[in-house]
């Protein structure tokens, strides 16, 4: 069965970086794009960006340009999202999710990774 | 890219119908037939309810229906049930592989 399994919760200090992983299984890795979406406490869903598993090309949301890097490792079927220069406003649940085209119509989602930014 | 506009709340009694709107621009909702709707419950990952404006994934009840007119998309939930109480988010393709979500609507079943 299709699964996207994310890494565990993280606590980071302001200014640090965090890397969240998302391991895909149960489908052909190169067939589906991966989006990263976050939800801060009490806030709505926010699209961060997308990575094409074939070739690794990325598109990032304007808000995250310069601070986010999305990569993939084809040898382990794992996607990564790294966010740098963390601030308290980055405290959120981070999700990876797949879509067949580069369209935000994701049918399977990871379980979420809570990132807490606190001094 | 600005978030799509949704009403913050909606409500209805069991058995009734409720419609949630999602307003964007000609650069997103109005420009493409790639509007999706997600149901989000606390502590759970979002669940895809509707894609490509009005298509339902396997397993989603036909009580959920999507439509679009111009720059505004709609999610209609018919025959409201207590289990439908959740947050609902629309999303749209915004060109150049970009996506955008709405601000979310909290649906209360009275």
Image (cartoon, rainbow, N blue to C red):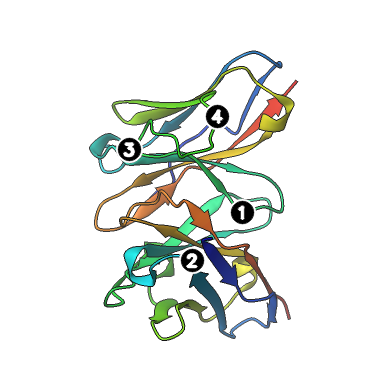
Q: Earlier in the sequence, mark 4 or mark 3?
A: 3
Mark 1 or mark 3, whichever is nearer to me = 1
Asked if residue A34 lies left or right of residue B17, the reply is left
Residue A104 in percent (x, y) is at: 39, 51
A99 in relation to A119, above or below? above
Would you say the residues marked 4 and 3 are in contact, meaning their CB atoms lie under 8 Å apart? Answer: no
- Letter of the chain that mark 2 sits on in the rendering: A
Q: Residue at x 46, y 84 (%)?
A: A76
A31 in relation to B64, above or below? below
Question: Which residue is label 3 attached to?
Answer: B29
Mark 2 or mark 3, whichever is nearer to me = 2
- Letter of the chain that mark 3 sits on in the rendering: B
Q: Residues within 10 Å of mark 3 (few under 14, many from 20)?
A: many
Front in this rendered view, residue A102 or A37: A102
Question: Gap in Å between the C-alphas at discs 2 and 1?
Answer: 18 Å
Question: Gap in Å between the C-alphas at discs 4 and 3?
Answer: 24 Å
Front in this rendered view, residue A2 or B12: A2
- At mark 4, the secondary structure is loop
Are marks 1 and 3 in one subunit?
A: yes
- At mark 1, the secondary structure is loop
Question: Which residue is label 1 attached to?
Answer: B45
Mark 4 or mark 3, whichever is nearer to me = 4
Residue B1 in percent (x, y) is at: 36, 52
Question: Which residue is label 2 attached to?
Answer: A26
Question: Gap in Å between the C-alphas at discs 2 and 3?
Answer: 32 Å
- Letter of the chain that mark 1 sits on in the rendering: B
Q: Residues within 10 Å of mark 1 (few under 14, many from 20)?
A: many
């Amino acid at each position: 069965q299709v699964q996207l399994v994310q890494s565990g919760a993280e606590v980071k200090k302001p200014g640090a970086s965090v890397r969240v992983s998302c391991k895909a299984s149960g489908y052909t890795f190169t067939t589906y794009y991966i989006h990263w979406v976050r939800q801060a406490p009490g806030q709505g869903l926010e699209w961060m960006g997308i990575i094409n598993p074939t070739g690794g090309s990325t598109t990032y949301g304007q808000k995250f340009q310069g601070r986010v890097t999305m990569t993939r490792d084809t040898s382990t079927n794992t996607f990564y999202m790294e966010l740098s220069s963390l601030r308290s406003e980055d405290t959120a649940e981070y999700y990876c999710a797949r879509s067949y085209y580069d369209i935000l119509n994701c049918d399977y989602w990871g379980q979420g990774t809570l990132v807490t930014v606190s001094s | 890219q600005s978030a799509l506009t949704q009403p913050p709340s909606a409500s209805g009694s069991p058995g009734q119908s409720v419609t949630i709107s999602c307003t964007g621009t000609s650069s997103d909702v109005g420009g493409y037939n790639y509007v999706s709707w997600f149901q989000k419950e606390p502590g759970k990952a979002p669940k895809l309810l509707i894609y490509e404006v009005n298509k339902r994934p396997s397993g989603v009840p036909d009580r959920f229906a999507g439509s679009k007119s111009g720059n505004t998309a709609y999610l209609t939930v018919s025959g409201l049930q207590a289990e439908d109480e959740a947050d609902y988010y629309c999303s749209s393709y915004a060109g150049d592989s970009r996506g955008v979500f709405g601000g979310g609507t909290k649906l209360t079943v009275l």
